[in-house]
Amino acid sequence: MTRSRPRHPNFSDEEIPRIVDADTNATATEFIGGSEIFQALLRRLRKYASLAFVTVLLEGETGTGKTMLARYLHSVSPRGQKPFLTMNVGTINDELASAELFGHERGSFTGADRTHKGYFLEASGGTLFLDELGKASLAVQQRLVTTVETGMVTPVGSTRTIKTDTRVIAATNVSIDHLVATGAFLPDLAARLTGSVIRVPPLRERREDIPQLAKHFVAALAPHVEYRSPPAIDERLMRALTRHHWPANIREMSNAMLQIVIEASPASVLKLEHCTQQLEYLRRLGRRERSRTTAAQVAQVVTRHGSVRAAAAALGLSVATVYRKLPRGGRRGASAERNGDGLGSAPTADSQFERDAT
Ligand SMILES: Nc1ncnc2c1ncn2[C@@H]1O[C@H](COP(=O)(O)OP(=O)(O)O)[C@@H](O)[C@H]1O
Ligand SMILES: [Mg+2]
């Protein structure tokens, strides 16, 4: 299992926001996520990593960890010691994007006052990460078709072609199939990428990871807000964190934790009350949940997850609370689990709770 290993760097105040979006050279130990779904994703990435020539497309909502995972894929690949360059293909104009990617000859356009190698050539031997590939213009996509296929680049304003040995990892937060259907993506380029699409699941599909992530962010942020040791997270707050939809995923969550930690300091326990106005949705979730998680619902979640421990993680409750909430029969079953018998064959229908949670 991937373990949390929060770092406590001694950054100054102005640097705090940066650690929320730290550009790490990811290693598996920096990933938070013991859920089977996330561990399966890492296993899959490692398989692709060993095929150092295969282009990989990471598809996932914003904030799900695509950039971090791209770095990881590179670092565990045979190219791991070679350069890893990132280019956000969606944010600059055509001419510049082409020149940045494929290089340009001196004088090939206004401002091109010297020859430039371009990212493909600079990353040769290593990996080029094309972020937000879905936003690349059709002209840039057209040029990418050949390069992705053959590794050959033709610098802007040049007639020579140069062979590169660059692995491409691309990311998009809109499905390429959808972009092709709407005419925003070239089918030719899609065909060369969609053989190796790796879907990065949104946080709400792996809620078991939320408590671990919350603790990780609190531990990483606390020293910046003059905490000697990280504050604890109150159960109701944890439950709200676990239940929220997180449309911007882990990035949104790290920002939320930052706000809560700042607001709460120096209290030793983070609570729903420390959620700022912007986090009103968490407060509302927390209040609503208190009355809604009935014993029967808790029992169903325990059944679904097969153990009290896993159910507690999924619900954002402590193991003790889950035991307390379980109806008497379930409690007997749960103590059987403690002895290694598991919960066995209770019904597995999705509870109202689980439906609400998505
Ligand atoms: N599994 C994870 N464990 C810990 N932090 C993560 C994890 N995945 C993403 N993050 C953090 O969440 C933020 C968003 O991740 P990022 O890779 O930039 O997402 P994306 O590229 O999909 O928008 C970053 O600060 C990143 O460090
Ligand atoms: Mg990114």
Image (cartoon, rainbow, N blue to C red):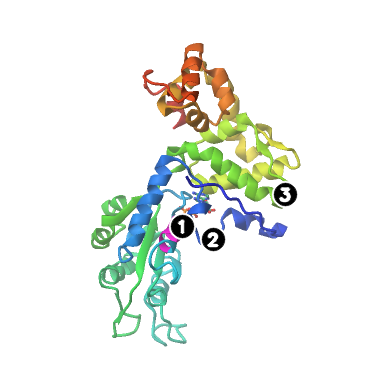
Q: Which mark is residue 225?
A: 3
Ligand 2 lies under 8 Å from the Cβ of mark 1: yes
Dot 1 or dot 2: first in sequence order is 2
Please state if 29 lies on the left or on the right of 141 as rendered: right
The three-letter code of the residue at mark 3 reads Val
Dot 3 or dot 2: first in sequence order is 2
Dot 3 or dot 1: first in sequence order is 1
SS at mark 2 in the image: loop
Q: Residue at x 41, y 63 (%)?
A: 74
Report the front residue among 226 and 87.
226
- Cβ–Cβ below 8 Å for labels 1 and 2? yes
Residue furthest to the front: 339
Q: Residue at x 51, y 30 (%)?
A: 309
SS at mark 1 in the image: helix
How many other residues sit within 10 Å of disc 2, few (<14), some (14-19) or many (≥20)? few
Label 2: which residue?
23
Please state if 304 lies on the left or on the right of 196 as rendered: right
Q: Position of residue 209 (x, y in %)?
A: 50, 40
Ligand 1 lies under 8 Å from the Cβ of mark 2: no
Quarter occupied by residue 343:
top left
The part of the chain drawn in magenta is 68-74
Q: Residue at x 34, y 55 (%)?
A: 47
Label 1: which residue?
67
The three-letter code of the residue at mark 1 reads Thr
SS at mark 3 in the image: helix
Q: Residue at x 70, y 35 (%)?
A: 269
